[in-house]
């Protein structure tokens, strides 16, 4: 008798109360993956989509062909940016819990993704981030005060109170506005990259989505356009194992790595240790060089782990073991870079502790300044009439009528 077909429902390896189990996560030894030339054909480098590029080993030593051999001073700067990202996140989380901002998303455990890739890209390259890339904004020059003001929706809010907190943008830093509709940034990045190629520029685009967003149609549309037109773009999938409360297998991560998603279209994929700043930097430089030379897009899967809740609206204890992050085999990106610098004699625990205190003071000072531009409960407040701006080049009469009526109501109430 023939076997009956069965519907497969992906299930995580562990649930609350279970022992963390990462046996499904295929790892490669540090330094074991070959580094091909940037001109290699996709069919000849398929191994990069299922191996795992790693530079730092368990003894914190850098090894292998992907080692970028960065100067100690540059690594110390990278460590500072990652620590600033984490200290900022911790402060903003506390502020939200105090009811002083409405919402926040941390990047805990994923700091190496934004900082290493920001270091690897050029200033003229355009970035289309997701909502856990705050380190990218910091590295590209956005002031902490401005990020805080956006979360407060106050009079200095770059988004004029029209965006959810943490959805920043910076024109001067070439970082596009974050969208709450998942994966829409992917087609935007491909289109921008196509335009750059049409204009004969050597600027490239880079975009980021989470593992769950790879199930969105925009993800696949972007890959198709990028492959057909050989757009100079880096498409990053940050596989942090969880899409809110859904395990990464729900988005299709069980059968093959996310890095392999583009192979059928001829897009090379690279799977990299997302908690190894050296490896992430090296892989991004390789992909960027390939794009600038006309080699087209690269899909990078950054294997990492979301150390905290998805957002301030989430409780991960409902769907995963409480100690799962501590058991993650690729560790903490900040701790790993710190230990690497200490191993090579360029850092110390005392210097590390001192830097943390300095960054805490910097973040606190920024918060005190941000409050001067208004909070959720104290002025100054945004002009309510600004809600009618930036919609039409020439506002229609009905909109002007609504503006006048609103102002009359506010004047009658004495609010203006």
Image (cartoon, rainbow, N blue to C red):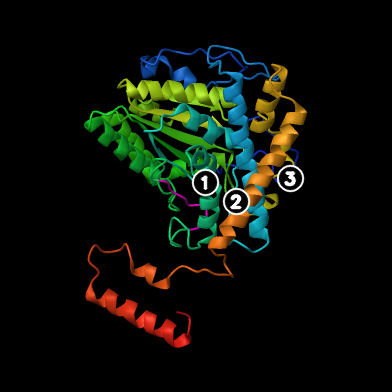
Choose the circle earlier in sequence order: 1 or 2: 1
Residue under circle 2?
366
Residue 248 to residue 117: above or below: below
Q: Residue 215 carries which label?
A: none
Q: Give the range drawn in magenta.
A: 164-170
In the image, residue 219 lies in the stretch drawn in magenta: no
Residue 377 seen in this snapshot: yes
Q: Residue at x 37, y 19 (%)?
A: 42
Q: Residues within 10 Å of mark 2 (few under 14, many from 20)?
A: some
Q: How crowded is mark 1: few (under 14 residues within 10 Å), some or many (20 or more)?
A: few
Q: Which mark is residue 322?
A: 3
Residue 378 to residue 45: above or below: below
Choose the circle earlier in sequence order: 2 or 3: 3
Residue nearest the observer in this picture, 278 or 37: 278
Q: In which quarter of the image is residue 404?
A: bottom left
Dot 2 lies on which element? helix
Residue nearest the observer in this picture, 289 or 377: 377
In the image, residue 167 lies in the stretch drawn in magenta: yes
Q: Residue at x 69, y 35 (%)?
A: 355
Residue 381 to residue 270: above or below: below
Residue 73 to residue 222: above or below: above
Would you say 213 lies left or right of 109 here? left
Quarter of the image with the C terminus in it: bottom left
> Principal SS element in the magenta part?
loop
Q: Residues within 10 Å of mark 3 (few under 14, many from 20)?
A: some
Dot 1 lies on which element? loop
Residue under circle 1?
143
| Picture coordinates of residue 77, whole percent (x, y) | 59, 29
Q: Tags 2 and 3 in contact by the CB under 8 Å rule?
A: no
Please give the count of numbered marks on the rendered protein. 3
């Amino acid at each position: 008798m023939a076997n009956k077909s069965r519907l497969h429902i992906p299930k995580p390896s562990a649930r609350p109360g279970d022992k963390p189990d990462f046996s499904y996560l295929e790892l490669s030894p540090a330094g074991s993956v070959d580094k091909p030339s940037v001109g290699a054909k996709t069919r000849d480098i398929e191994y990069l989509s299922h191996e795992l590029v790693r530079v730092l080993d368990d003894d914190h030593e850098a090894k292998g062909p992907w080692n970028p051999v960065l100067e100690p001073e540059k690594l110390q700067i990278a460590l500072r940016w990652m620590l600033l990202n984490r200290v900022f996140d911790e402060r903003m989380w506390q502020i939200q819990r105090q009811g002083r901002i409405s919402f926040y998303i941390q990047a805990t455990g994923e700091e190496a993704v934004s900082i290493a890739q920001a270091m690897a890209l050029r200033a003229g390259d355009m970035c289309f981030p997701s909502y856990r890339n705050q380190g990218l904004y910091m590295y590209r020059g956005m002031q902490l005060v401005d990020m805080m003001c956006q979360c407060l929706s106050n009079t200095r809010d770059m988004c004029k109170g029209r965006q959810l907190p943490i959805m920043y943008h910076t024109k001067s830093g070439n970082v596009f506005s974050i969208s709450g509709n998942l994966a829409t940034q992917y087609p935007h990045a491909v289109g921008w990259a196509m335009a750059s190629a049409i204009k004969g520029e050597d600027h490239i685009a880079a975009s980021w989505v989470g593992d769950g967003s790879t199930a969105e149609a925009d993800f696949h549309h972007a890959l198709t356009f990028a492959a057909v037109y050989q757009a100079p773009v880096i498409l990053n999938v940050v596989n942090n194992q969880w899409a809110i409360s859904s395990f990464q297998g729900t988005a299709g991560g069980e059968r093959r790595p996310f890095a392999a998603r583009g192979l059928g279209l001829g897009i090379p994929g690279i799977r990299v240790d997302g908690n190894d700043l050296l490896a992430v930097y090296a892989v991004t430089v390789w992909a960027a060089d390939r794009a600038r030379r006309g080699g087209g897009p690269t899909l990078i899967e950054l294997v990492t782990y979301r150390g905290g809740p998805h957002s301030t609206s989430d409780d991960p204890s409902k769907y995963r073991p409480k100690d799962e992050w501590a058991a993650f085999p690729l560790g903490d990106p900040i701790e790993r870079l710190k230990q690497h610098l200490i191993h090579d004699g360029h850092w110390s625990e005392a210097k590390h502790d001192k830097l943390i205190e300095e960054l805490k003071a910097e973040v606190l000072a920024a918060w005190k300044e941000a409050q001067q531009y208004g909070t959720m409960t104290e002025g100054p407040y945004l002009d309510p009439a600004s809600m009618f701006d930036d919609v039409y080049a020439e506002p229609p009469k009905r909109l002007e009528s609504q503006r006048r009526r609103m102002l009359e109501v506010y004047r009658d109430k004495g609010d203006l």
